[in-house]
Amino acid sequence: MSGENYRSATKSHDPGWNDPPPIPTSHKPRAGGAKADKKQEENAAPATEDSLPEREEMIGQIRTVFDGYVQQLEESRRANVQKRIDLLYDQWAKGTLPEQLEALIYRLSAALLDEDDVRANVLHRTIVCDHAGKCAQWAPVLRQLIFVLQLRNEQTKPVVADQIVQPL
């Protein structure tokens, strides 16, 4: 290989269209910082920690709501979903879940109870992203409960005659 056709990484040259952007060498905090994190947390969890009920009341509501939604699933899915939700109940009973995760689960049950599928989706995403290690076995089935709610909400939506069915 001739040296004139080979470009060393140490030689300066004009970057091509597919060259990766340069990596910044300074360690500055990312834009937004703590304010952006706090804003995201407020959006995902509008209620404050002070407004949460006792831990036993929380699990009571969670069990009632989640078990009610499990009964609305297709018969073929119920056993598997219930088995995984029981793993959540076991972790709750043993006290192995962080308080923040317990609060998010409670708020998810409240969103399901209020039939707010948008808020339920946001809370589910927060649970899965922020606490993946603790909820990997049971968090995916919570999505099934949200699907039940979304299906119910779609069926009860009034059909508007002026809706555009096919865009241009």
Image: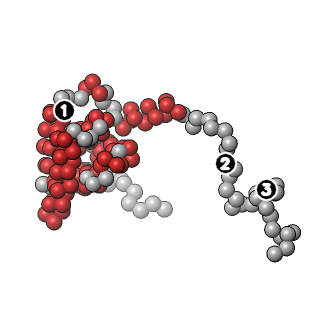
Q: Nearer the viewer, residue 34 or 74?
A: 34
C-alpha span from label 1 to label 3: 60 Å
Describe the element under mark 2 as helix, strand or loop.
loop
Q: Nearer the viewer, residue 52 or 154?
A: 52
Mark drawn on residue 55: 1
Q: Is any atom of residue 158 visible in this view?
A: no
Q: Position of residue 73 (x, y in %)?
A: 17, 58
The residue at which mark 3 appears reads as 10
| N-term-proximal mark, 3 vs 2 | 3
Name the amino acid type tagged 2. Ile
Describe the element under mark 3 as helix, strand or loop.
loop
Lateral position of residue 71 relative to residue 123, left or right = left
Mark drawn on residue 115: none
The residue at which mark 2 appears reads as 23
Q: Is any atom of residue 42 visible in this view?
A: yes
Q: Position of residue 142 (x, y in %)?
A: 25, 51
Q: Is residue 38 above or below residue 77?
A: above
